Image (cartoon, rainbow, N blue to C red):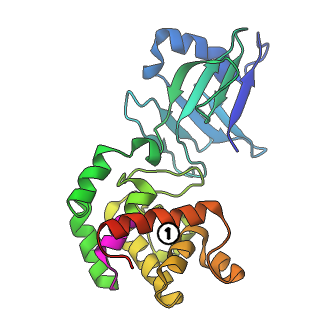
Amino acid sequence: MGLYTRHHGKHSGRAPLRLLVLLAGLVLAGSSAAELYTYRDASGARVLTDERPQGVPYETIRSPARTGTATPAPGGGDWSPSQIFVFQGPGGERLVTNQHRQDNGMELIATYGRPTARARCGERARHALATGGGEFADLIHTAATRQGVDPALVQSVIHVESCFDPQAVSRVGAHGLMQLMPATAADLGVTDRFDPAQNIDGGTRYLAAMLDRFGGNLDLALAAYNAGPGAVERHGGVPPFRETQTYIQRIRAQYTGNGRAH
């Protein structure tokens, strides 16, 4: 489900949609230089604003033209900021959403945040695949050797999970090269999911644990990595989830391309 915030016509108040009242000025001044902020209010609702919050933990959403990253403040990190798009309709109405495609005649007028891993997948991934992991080759080889896992398998997982982007953030909150979820990272002792060494080491340990748990069955281990071991056990095999089944196919295709899968 996408994030949507709408504003129709004039706005008599300033909260919580004051972001949309001020956006026109930001766009005219050059939206690439603007920053947005997000935090949860006392009721638990997610608030987006262009005014720096005071007295609450918040996260900064920067334009890709600046740094392309989101900087969490202490106590933040409960929201995964990918790109946020601002559209304007023919009547002047505004739509703030994380969904890039709009089929209702609205015009894209501003973009904030950083692209998802899929959107950034390109030359970085091609180089990494051609060089056994690119800049992460040594980390992959060390972690895989330590856990008795084929480095080519770890490389294939990283390719599908993040396209070798160490700053990748998924829509459900998975972070880093091997897309570790917060609870999984905590169980693995990973304190910084964006750190390539910690992420690859933790992700490889988790992959090895899934291979061991499911008797070396690659499909089941990959299904568990994607959907969780509980889902595999409840369904007595690969869960009937299209995402998980496609995930296995993509990794197997990459792994087979390395001449390793069978």
In the figure, residue 256 lies in which quadrant? bottom left
- Residue at the location (72% across, 41% down)? 41
Q: Quadrant of the N terminus?
A: top right
Answer left or right for 216 relative to 87: left
Instruction: Name which residue lies at 36% across and 60% down.
Output: 195
Q: Position of residue 48 (x, y in %)?
A: 64, 32
Q: Is the C terminus in the top left, top right, bottom left or bottom right quadrant? A: bottom left
Considering depth in this image, is 204 or 74 the residue closer to the camera?
A: 204
State whether residue 31 is above or below residue 10.
below
Residue sitting nearer the eye, 240 or 172? 240
Image vertical order of residue 226 relative to residue 210, above or below:
above
Determine if the magenta segment contains residue 150: yes
Residue 4: x, y in percent?
A: 70, 33
Residue 104 belongs to magenta span: no
Q: Nearer the viewer, residue 29 or 203?
A: 203
Q: Name which residue type carries label 1.
A: Ala
Q: Main secondary structure of the magenta part?
A: helix
At a point 56% along the width and 55% down the height, the residue shown is 173
**Mark 1 crowdedness (10 Å alpha carbons): few <14, some 14-19, many ≥20:** many
Which residue corresponds to the image point at 38% horizontal and 59% vertical from the top-left?
159
88 w.r.t. 111: above or below: above
Quarter-of-image position of residue 234 = bottom right
Does residue 176 appear in this view? Answer: no
Q: Provide residue 49's location: percent of width, then percent of height.
A: 62, 28
Residue identified by numbered label 1: 185
Q: Which residues are magenta?
A: 148-157
Viewer-nearest residue: 74 or 170: 170
Q: Secondary structure at mark 1?
A: helix
Find residue 27 and report its horizontal and vertical position in percent: 52, 14
**Total label count?**
1
